[in-house]
């Protein structure tokens, strides 16, 4: 369950060399896979630089704009396979920080950094919050990241309903998982239901901004809501 190795990666993103883009070791199909198989410019670059996913560039871009992650932070990464964000977050929080990710698919090969734990699980499961908290050492996260996206079926109503359920599950995790004052970044796909949740999420933070990233594929409906200063939801 816990992925660990002997050294923490502190090298810049481009120097995290790997031999190939990674695929999950178990048979749960990931909605991300078809996207990664499209050979666009960033996909090719990620492959060349040995990164686990082109998605790594998105967290780099968010960090460049918002400086969300700091040394020593505890970070939860929701929908973390194949681990591109885990590696970036691991480097940004450093040896004094902790990163706990979860996905339906197993992160394999494991992240070679002792400050990262990658769990296999469903964000919609009742025990997910407790598992992530435990992996973070019992204290809530300073930053919650979500790049999670449901597997697309091609049936628009169903895809929207799945996205809505996923966003609601993530929204429900926040009061327990994110400390008051903490930061949040979440991918939101366009759609009326998602926009309602987007509006609700904004009210839970003192500051919030929606951004379309340069590293997002052309034609994609994804946006990222980046929010700071969580008002806290337990009381
Ligand atoms: C775009 S990928 C994430 C890429 C990742 N940020 C990276 O840098 O490698 C989206 C992920 O969300 C995951 N996901 C979708 N629904 C989920 C759920 N209910 N529970 C856990 N993970 C989920 C998918 O399995 C998929 O791997």
Image (cartoon, rainbow, N blue to C red):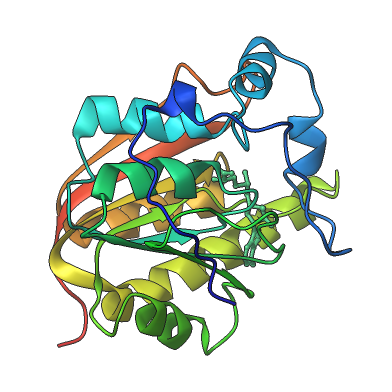
Ligand 1: give its quadrant: bottom right
> Residue at the spot x=60%, y=77% of the render?
1
Q: Is residue 88 visible?
A: yes
Residue 21, image quadrant: top right
Residue 36 coordinates in the image, percent (x, y): 74, 32
Q: Is residue 148 above or below residue 63?
A: below
Residue projecting furthest to the top = 41
Q: Residue furthest right?
A: 27
Q: Indicate the position of residue 108 as horizontal and vertical percent values.
A: 70, 56
Residue placed most toward the observer, 74 or 189: 74
> For this view, does 209 lie left or right of residue 190?
left
87 displayed left or right of 22:
left
Asked if residue 24 lies left or right of residue 92, the reply is right
**Along the viewing direction, whichever of 43 and 222 lies nearer the viewer:** 43
The residue at the point 18 percent across, 71 percent down is 179
Which residue is the extreme one toward the front? 6
Residue 16 position (above or below residue 204): above
Res. 211 in view: no
- Seen at 53% across and 74% down, the residue is 2
């Amino acid at each position: 369950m816990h992925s660990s190795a002997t050294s923490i990666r502190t090298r810049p993103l481009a120097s995290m060399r790997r031999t190939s883009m990674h695929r999950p070791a178990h048979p749960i199909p990931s909605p991300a896979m078809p996207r990664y198989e499209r050979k666009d410019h960033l996909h090719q670059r990620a492959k060349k630089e040995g990164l686990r996913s082109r998605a790594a560039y998105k967290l780099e871009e968010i960090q460049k704009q918002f400086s969300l992650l700091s040394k020593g932070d505890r970070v939860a990464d929701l929908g973390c396979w194949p681990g591109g964000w885990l590696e970036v977050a691991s480097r940004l929080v450093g040896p004094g920080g902790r990163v706990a990710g979860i996905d339906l698919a197993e992160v394999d090969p494991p992240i070679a950094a002792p400050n990262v734990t990658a769990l296999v699980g469903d964000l919609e499961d009742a025990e997910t919050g407790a598992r992530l908290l435990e992996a973070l050492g019992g204290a809530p996260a300073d930053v919650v990241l979500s790049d999670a996206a449901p597997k697309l079926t091609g049936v628009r109503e169903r895809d929207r309903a799945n996205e809505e359920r996923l966003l609601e599950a993530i929204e429900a995790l926040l009061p327990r998982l994110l400390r008051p004052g903490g930061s949040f970044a979440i991918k939101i796909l366009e759609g009326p239901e998602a926009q309602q949740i987007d509006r609700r999420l904004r009210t839970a933070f003192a500051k919030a901004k929606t951004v379309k990233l340069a590293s997002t594929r052309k034609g994609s409906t994804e946006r990222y809501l980046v929010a700071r200063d969580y008002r806290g939801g337990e009381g």
